[in-house]
């Protein structure tokens, strides 16, 4: 459903060109370079917008020119059918409260531990995903694969997670401080680490280089997820080699990390930066292949279950695809996924990890007393403090029926989520009400309900197609963590960086690759 365009902002001393932008950036307005200034005074003044200083139009134009040149010179790019372009970005960082940033960074190891412990609790996963799987074929196939590998005997006890937990600021509109509310946790193909790192560097450069921004580069927190992801892949590969001695004739053993990618990948530069860092710091080559290519070219030794591809022994399989049904065009992709899952290679992530990232498990973990099954009371308290309201659907209980009825009566207060990743899948407003009325009670178990997070809007400067666009935006902060474990034992768990994405306040979704938002970075302030 197409979002209605937002009202035109009334901003003093700012002349806007009349041209409107359509599509995913509906409602954006081109900023005329003849304007005297970009005033960050918002139509709805709030804590975030109050920390946005006015920027002279001359400084905005200088930022645009420099941002375009810097991005092209430093690989802040995406690949489109028309060629290589600068990624959709904001040219000014978004104010973000320092205490909230510190709070969510402090949750990374808690969430890492939670994900891993849930992933090895097979009874828990099956109990809570069984009904959902009946009405969601993709979830059913992923769960079935995790179960089949466990029943056969897990060949590789090492697991690697590159996880990202996403949050939005919630404004209760009662004078209380802004609070983080978790949107989701991503356990597979957590993207944009490299491009996010470059946006952070770009913003620090612009604030130091251009006069008149009113912001200080030292308030931008450090951000280095590329080195962190490469460390996870490198250490997992090293651990693999230590546990998998060379076989007969293995004196010329060649080890590589396999990147699973989509056939026509637009976010290739985000992936390549990690690949190059892996080589620079660990001298480990990366091979890129789609699932179909793995099935056609990959060889799994049934005795040792070593996985080989293109002359290399694969130590780690890093999934940057495989998170959506669209990545599985037929049985050959599922056969490739099974081949990988059965192999001795370290999976990043395993099918079990992917199941933990489902919306259903997120909803179940928010229930009273559930976290304490996996983490201690202090960790459970920290985690629970960031949860939004989450509700089961279709279970035939008074609670699930009440949730559906409340959403029908007050659609503006809820979002309906399927078990999907990648942006553009959620249902809102009349579309949600229609789906709730159309589906049978048991079919609703493929979805959950979540409270709408009331994020405070603030003015922003987006750059698309080398043009600066003035928007009223909301923002979403993601924190990256790496987790290397062996069986029940966690070997490494740490925070490695952040991602900030901003979108027009009128848009419901924030996916950059899906066309809804731009890459941004936080600049911290003390409330």
Image (spheres, rainbow, N blue to C red):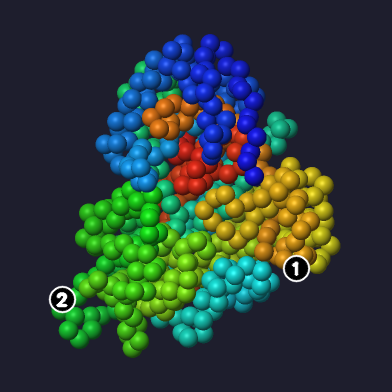
User: Where is residue 516 shown, x and y percent of the image?
Assistant: 53, 41
In the rendering, which numbered label is found on residue 442?
1
From the viewer's side, name the closer residue of 22 and 511.
Answer: 22
In the rendering, which numbered label is found on residue 113?
none
Q: Residue furthest bottom?
A: 303
User: Where is residue 407 shown, x and y percent of the image?
Assistant: 77, 50
Query: What count of labels does the image hold?
Result: 2
Looking at the image, which residue is at 40% across and 43% down?
Answer: 196
User: Where is residue 394 shown, x and y percent of the image?
Assistant: 76, 64
Q: Is residue 121 visible?
A: no
Comparing marks 1 and 2, which lies closer to the viewer? 1
Q: Which residue is mark 2?
A: 252
From the viewer's side, name the closer residue of 332 and 462.
Answer: 332
Q: Does residue 271 appear to the left or right of 405 in the view shown?
A: left
Q: Secondary structure at mark 2?
A: helix
- CB under 8 Å between discs 1 and 2: no
Q: Secondary structure at mark 1?
A: helix
Q: Is residue 4 visible?
A: yes
Q: Is residue 362 above or below residue 181?
A: below
Quarter of the image with the C terminus is top right
């Amino acid at each position: 459903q197409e979002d209605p365009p937002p009202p035109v902002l009334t901003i003093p001393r700012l002349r806007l060109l009349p041209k409107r932008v359509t599509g995913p950036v509906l409602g954006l307005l081109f900023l005329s370079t003849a304007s005297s200034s970009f005033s960050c005074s918002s139509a709805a003044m709030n804590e975030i917008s109050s920390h946005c200083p006015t920027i002279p139009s001359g400084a905005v134009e200088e930022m645009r020119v420099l941002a375009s040149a810097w991005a092209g010179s430093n690989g802040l790019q995406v690949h489109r059918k028309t060629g290589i372009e600068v990624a959709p970005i904001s040219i000014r960082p978004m104010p973000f409260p320092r205490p909230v940033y510190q709070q969510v960074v402090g949750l990374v190891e808690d969430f890492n531990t939670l994900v891993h412990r849930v992933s090895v609790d097979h009874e828990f996963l099956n109990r809570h995903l069984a009904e959902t799987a009946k009405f969601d074929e993709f979830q059913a196939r992923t769960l079935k694969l995790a179960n089949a590998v466990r029943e056969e005997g897990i060949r590789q006890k090492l697991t690697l997670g590159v996880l990202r937990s996403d949050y939005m600021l919630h404004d209760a509109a009662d004078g209380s401080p802004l609070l983080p509310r978790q949107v989701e946790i991503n356990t597979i193909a957590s993207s944009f680490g490299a491009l996010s790192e470059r946006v952070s560097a770009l913003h620090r450069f612009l604030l130091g280089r251009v006069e008149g921004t009113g912001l200080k580069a030292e308030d931008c927190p450090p951000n280095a997820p590329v080195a962190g992801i490469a460390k996870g892949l490198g250490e997992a590969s090293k651990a693999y080699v230590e546990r998998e001695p060379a076989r007969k004739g293995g004196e010329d053993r060649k080890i590589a990390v396999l990147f699973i990618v989509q056939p026509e990948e637009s976010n290739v530069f985000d992936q390549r930066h990690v690949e190059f860092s892996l080589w620079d710091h660990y001298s480990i080559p990366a091979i890129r292949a789609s699932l179909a290519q793995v099935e056609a070219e990959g060889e799994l030794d049934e005795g040792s279950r070593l996985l080989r591809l293109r002359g290399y022994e694969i130590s780690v399989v890093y999934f940057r695809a495989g998170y959506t049904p669209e990545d599985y065009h037929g049985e050959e992709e599922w056969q490739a996924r099974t081949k990988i899952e059965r192999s001795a290679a370290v999976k990043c992530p395993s099918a079990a990890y992917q199941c933990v990232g489902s919306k259903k498990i997120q909803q179940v973990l928010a229930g009273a007393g559930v976290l304490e099954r996996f983490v201690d009371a202090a960790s459970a308290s920290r985690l629970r403090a960031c949860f939004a309201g989450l509700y089961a659907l279709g279970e035939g209980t008074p609670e699930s029926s009440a949730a559906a009825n409340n959403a029908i009566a007050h659609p503006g207060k809820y979002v309906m989520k399927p078990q999907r990743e990648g942006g553009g899948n959620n249902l809102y407003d009349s579309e949600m009400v229609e789906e709730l009325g159309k589906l049978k009670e048991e079919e609703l178990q493929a979805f959950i309900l979540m409270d709408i997070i009331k994020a405070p809007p603030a003015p922003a400067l987006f750059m698309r197609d080398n043009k600066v666009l003035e928007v009223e935006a909301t923002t979403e902060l993601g924190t990256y963590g790496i987790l290397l474990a062996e069986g029940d034992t966690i070997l490494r768990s740490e925070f490695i960086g952040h991602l900030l994405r901003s979108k027009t306040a009128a848009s419901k979704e924030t996916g950059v690759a899906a066309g809804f938002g731009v890459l941004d970075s936080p600049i911290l302030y003390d409330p």
